Image (tube, helix red, strand yellow):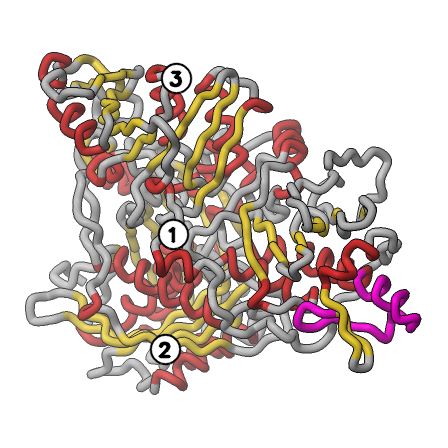
C-alpha cells in the first residue's frame, strides 16, 4: 500500500487499511512528517516507520542506524519492546529503508554541519542524507522518538482491546506481547487491525519508573546469525553472475601513470580496468583478480614533499612554536591570571592513529537496465547512495543502496571509498562486481586520526587545585575533515569537535584553549573516540603532573575541583575504590583518569608498568561508568571493554609509518588474549538521559595508563604511542 501524507498533523498519523491490514502510526523523528517508509507483508501491520506486528505476534523493529558491532540492532529494538510491552523472544530486526525520516537528529548538536553553510545544511536535513552512525549518538538520538512511537501504538492497542472488553482503556496495559486487563489477555496480532480505527493520543504517555526490559542484559538479536555463520557482511554478498575485483590506488592527490597489461594477460579470465587514480582487475575469483592486478605493476605519480614521518612532525613542531593561533575557547582571563609568573608547562603529542578494523573496504554493484543496486557496509547510507548514483550516471531515484552491517568498529566505513569504484567496474564489465580491498591496500588508503601536539600551561591555586589553564593545540580535526568530505563542505580549521577533551572537566576559573590549524601531507579522518583520544590524554596527564608538582595525591587533587561535575566525581572515586587505589605514590603502578563525553562519564584506574624488554604491560583496568539510563547492561559492558582494548592497542602499539601520504602496511595491532588486561566495569545507576558509550573507553584509556606508567617508571611519557625507552 502506497501512502501519501499531505496536510498531516506534525506529530502523529493514523491510517486505517481495513480488516487484516493492521495498525500504522507514523511518528516523524526530524524535522518533518512522511508516510510510513516500511514495506509490509501479508499478515503484517506497520506501526509508523519503526515497528511492524504480524498476526503471529512477531514484532519487527526497523533500525535506522547501522550495526557496527556496537549492538544497536539490539539496543533500539529493546527500547521499543520495553515501551510497547512486547515479548523479547518475539522481537526481530531489519534495516530501515531509504527515507528522509531516518536522519540523525543529533547531527547539528554533534557539530557535523559546521563544515557547510546554512543552505547546504537545510538541504541535507530535508533530503535525509544525515542518516549517519557515528559519535556515539545512536541511542541518544533515537531513544526518545522510539519510546514515543511505541507509547502511541501501545495506547491505541489498549483502546482497541478496551472497546472489545467494554472497559476503560486507562485500565488496560500491555505486557509480554498481550494487552491485559484483570486477567484478560489479547495478543497484539489480534487487536492491531481494530486499533487502526482508533484516534492516537495527542501526547503519548511514556512508562514511568523502572523499565521491564530496559537495563537488562538481553541477548543480542544478531547473535544467532553470527553464531551459525548466516550473518551477512559486505564480502558475503552473492548475486547471479558476480565477478570479483581487486585494485591498486594512487597516493592522495596522485594519478595512475602506467601499468604492464601484458603481464596480467597470463591470468586467464582476468581483465584490467583503470581510472584516473586506480587500476583494478576483474576476475571470476578475488584471488585471481589480486594476482592479475599485482602482476600489472601499476605505476603512480604522487605529490612531492609528502614522504616520511619527519615532514608531519616538522610541520607540527614549527606550528607549535610559531604558528598563528585562533581562540577556540576562553573563560575568565588567563593572561591576567598568569601575569608574569612562569606556570608549569609541558608539551604532549599523539601520532596518527590508524583504523584497526577486521573488515577491509568492500562494495558490490549491479546494473539492471537503468537501475543501479549497491551493497555496502557504510555508516552513511544515504550519502553513499548519492555517491553511487553520481559514479554510475544514474538518477538518485533509480539507485538502491542496501546498507550492510559493518565489520570495522573504528569508523572507517563512514566514507564510501569503495562504492564509486565498484560502480565504475560494474558498468564497465556489464556484470555485477564485488570489489574487496586487500589488507595492504586497506592500510595504504587509510586516513588516520589526526596527529596532534599540545603545549599545556597551568598555574596552581594557592588554596589547592588549578587557578589558570592554557592549551595550545596543533594539528587538524579528523572528524571535521571526514564530515567535510561527506557533506560537501570545507574541513579546514577547527570546529566544535576540535574541543573534544581539550577542556578540563574541572572548576578552573581561567581557561584558554588555542588552536593552530595546519595543512598536513597526510589526509585525516574520523576515528572511534575522535579527538578525545588525544586531547583527553593531554589533559588528564597534565592534571596528574600538576598534582604531583603540588605534592598532592592525584585523586584528592581532582576531587577538589569536581564539585560542579558530581557524576564524574562519583565515577572516578568509584573506580578508585573498586581498584584499591594506593595513592599512586612511590612504588605504585596505578594511574587514574576521567572523562565526560557523549553525555556520559567514566572514571578509570589502570595498573601498568614496563617489562624488562621495555614493553608496556597493562595488567588491570577498572572502569566506573555513568551513562545515564542504561538500555542494555550487557551491550554497555561490551562497548566499554571493546573500547578499552582498542584504545590500548593505539596507545601501546607502533606509530604508523607514512610514505607519500600513505601508511606503510603492517599487521593489525590488537593485543593477544594473553596480553589483554583483566577488565572490571561498574555501571553506576542514574536517572539521567541515556548517554553514548562506544567511544568512551577508547578515549580515556591512554591517560590512565600513562599516569600509571609515570608512577611505576618515575618518568612521564608524553607521547602516544608510549615508548618506555624515550627520555622523560
Image quarter of the C terminus? bottom left
> Considering only order in the chain, which callout, 2 or 1, is on the residue closer to the N terminus?
1
Tell me which segment is drawn in magenta. Answer: 157-178
Number of marks: 3
> Considering only order in the chain, which callout, 2 or 3, is on the residue closer to the N terminus?
3
- Left or right of 364 on screen, residue 15: right
Marking on residue 230: 1
The image quadrant of residue 621 is bottom left
Q: Can you give x and y, in whole percent of width and height, for residue 523 in the image?
A: 33, 34
Instruction: Note whether 382 is above or below 621 in the view shown.
Output: above
> Which structural element holds mark 3?
helix
Q: Which residue is mark 3?
A: 427
Q: Nearer the viewer, residue 306 or 347?
A: 306
Marking on residue 542: none
- Left or right of 265 on screen, residue 622: right
Q: Mark 3–mark 1 contact, CB under 8 Å?
A: no
Q: Mark 3–mark 2 contact, CB under 8 Å?
A: no
Q: Can you give x and y, in whole percent of width and height, for residue 25 in the image?
A: 76, 50
The image quadrant of residue 580 is bottom left
Disc 2 crowd, CA 10 A, few/some/many (<14, 14-19, 20+): some
Q: Can you give x and y, in whole percent of width and height, for residue 100 in the image?
A: 65, 37
Q: Which residue is mark 2?
A: 680
- Left or right of 98 on screen, residue 167: right
Q: Nearer the viewer, residue 423 or 259?
A: 423
Instruction: Note whether 169 is above or below 67 in the view shown.
Output: below
Q: Nearer the viewer, residue 87 or 686?
A: 87
Nearer the viewer's eye, disc 3 or disc 2?
3
Amino acid at each position: 500500500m502506497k501512502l501519501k501524507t499531505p496536510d498531516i498533523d506534525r506529530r502523529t498519523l493514523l491510517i486505517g487499511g481495513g480488516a487484516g491490514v493492521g495498525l500504522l502510526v507514523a511518528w516523524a523523528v526530524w524535522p518533518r512528517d512522511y508516510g510510513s517508509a516500511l514495506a509490509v507483508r501479508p499478515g503484517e501491520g506497520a506501526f509508523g516507520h519503526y515497528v511492524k506486528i504480524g498476526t503471529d505476534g512477531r514484532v519487527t523493529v526497523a533500525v535506522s542506524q547501522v550495526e557496527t558491532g556496537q549492538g544497536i540492532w539490539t539496543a533500539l529494538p529493546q527500547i521499543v519492546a520495553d515501551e510497547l510491552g512486547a515479548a523479547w523472544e518475539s522481537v526481530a530486526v531489519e534495516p530501515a529503508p531509504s527515507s528522509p525520516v531516518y536522519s540523525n537528529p543529533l547531527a547539528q548538536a554533534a557539530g557535523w554541519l559546521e563544515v557547510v553553510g546554512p543552505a547546504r545544511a537545510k538541504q541535507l536535513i530535508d533530503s535525509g542524507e544525515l542518516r549517519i552512525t557515528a559519535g556515539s549518538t545512536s541511542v541518544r538520538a533515537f531513544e526518545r522518538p522510539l519510546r514515543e512511537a511505541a507509547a502511541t501504538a501501545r495506547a491505541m492497542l489498549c483502546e482497541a482491546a478496551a472497546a472489545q472488553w467494554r472497559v476503560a482503556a486507562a485500565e488496560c496495559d500491555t505486557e509480554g506481547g498481550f494487552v491485559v486487563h484483570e486477567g484478560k489477555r489479547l495478543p497484539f496480532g489480534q487487536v492491531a487491525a481494530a486499533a487502526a480505527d482508533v484516534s492516537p493520543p495527542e501526547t503519548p504517555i511514556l512508562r514511568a519508573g523502572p523499565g521491564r526490559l530496559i537495563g537488562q542484559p538481553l541477548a543480542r538479536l544478531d547473535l544467532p546469525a553470527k553464531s551459525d555463520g548466516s550473518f551477512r557482511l559486505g564480502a558475503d554478498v552473492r548475486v547471479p553472475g558476480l565477478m570479483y575485483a581487486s585494485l591498486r590506488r594512487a597516493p592522495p592527490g596522485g594519478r595512475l601513470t602506467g601499468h604492464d597489461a601484458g603481464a596480467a594477460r597470463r591470468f586467464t579470465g582476468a581483465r584490467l580496468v583503470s581510472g584516473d587514480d586506480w587500476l583494478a582487475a576483474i576476475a571470476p575469483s578475488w584471488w585471481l583478480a589480486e594476482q592479475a592486478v599485482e602482476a600489472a605493476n601499476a605505476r603512480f605519480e604522487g605529490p612531492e614533499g609528502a614522504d616520511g614521518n619527519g615532514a608531519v612532525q616538522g610541520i607540527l613542531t614549527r606550528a607549535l612554536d610559531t604558528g598563528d593561533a585562533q581562540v577556540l575557547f576562553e573563560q575568565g582571563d588567563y593572561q591576567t591570571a598568569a601575569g608574569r609568573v612562569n606556570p608549569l608547562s609541558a608539551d604532549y603529542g599523539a601520532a596518527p592513529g590508524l583504523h584497526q578494523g577486521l573488515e577491509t573496504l568492500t562494495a558490490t554493484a549491479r546494473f539492471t537496465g537503468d537501475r543501479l543496486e549497491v551493497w555496502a557496509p557504510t555508516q552513511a547510507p544515504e550519502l553513499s547512495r548519492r555517491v553511487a548514483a553520481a559514479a554510475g550516471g544514474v538518477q538518485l531515484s533509480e539507485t538502491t543502496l542496501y546498507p550492510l552491517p559493518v565489520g570495522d568498529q573504528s569508523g572507517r566505513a563512514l566514507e564510501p571509498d569503495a562504492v564509486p569504484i565498484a560502480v565504475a567496474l560494474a558498468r564497465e564489465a556489464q556484470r555485477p562486481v564485488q570489489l574487496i580491498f586487500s589488507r595492504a591496500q586497506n592500510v595504504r588508503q587509510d586516513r588516520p586520526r589526526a596527529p596532534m601536539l599540545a603545549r599545556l600551561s597551568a598555574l596552581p591555586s594557592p588554596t589547592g587545585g588549578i587557578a589558570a589553564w592554557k592549551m595550545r593545540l596543533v594539528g587538524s580535526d579528523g572528524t571535521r575533515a571526514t564530515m567535510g568530505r561527506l557533506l560537501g563542505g570545507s574541513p579546514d580549521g577547527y570546529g566544535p569537535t576540535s574541543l573534544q577533551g581539550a577542556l578540563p572537566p574541572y572548576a578552573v576559573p581561567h581557561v584558554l584553549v588555542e588552536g593552530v590549524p595546519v595543512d598536513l601531507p597526510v589526509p585525516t579522518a574520523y576515528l572511534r573516540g575522535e579527538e578525545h583520544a588525544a586531547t583527553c590524554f593531554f589533559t588528564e596527564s597534565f592534571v596528574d603532573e600538576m598534582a604531583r608538582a603540588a605534592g598532592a595525591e592525584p585523586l584528592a587533587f581532582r576531587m577538589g575541583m569536581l564539585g560542579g561535575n558530581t557524576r564524574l566525581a562519583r565515577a572516578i572515586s568509584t573506580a578508585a575504590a573498586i581498584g584499591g587505589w594506593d595513592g599512586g605514590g612511590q612504588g605504585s603502578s596505578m594511574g587514574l583518569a576521567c572523562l565526560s563525553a557523549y553525555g556520559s562519564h567514566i572514571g578509570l584506574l589502570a595498573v601498568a608498568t614496563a617489562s624488562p624488554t621495555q614493553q608496556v604491560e597493562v595488567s588491570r583496568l577498572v572502569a566506573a561508568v555513568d551513562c545515564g539510563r542504561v538500555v542494555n547492561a550487557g551491550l554497555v559492558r561490551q562497548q566499554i571493554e571493546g573500547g578499552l582494548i582498542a584504545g590500548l592497542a593505539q596507545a601501546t602499539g607502533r606509530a604508523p609509518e607514512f610514505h607519500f601520504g600513505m601508511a606503510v602496511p603492517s599487521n593489525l595491532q590488537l593485543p593477544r588474549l594473553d596480553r589483554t588486561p583483566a577488565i572490571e566495569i561498574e555501571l553506576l545507576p542514574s536517572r539521567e538521559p541515556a548517554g553514548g558509550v562506544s567511544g568512551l573507553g577508547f578515549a580515556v584509556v591512554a591517560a590512565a595508563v600513562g599516569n600509571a606508567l609515570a608512577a611505576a617508571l618515575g618518568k612521564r611519557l608524553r607521547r602516544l604511542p608510549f615508548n618506555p625507552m624515550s627520555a622523560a
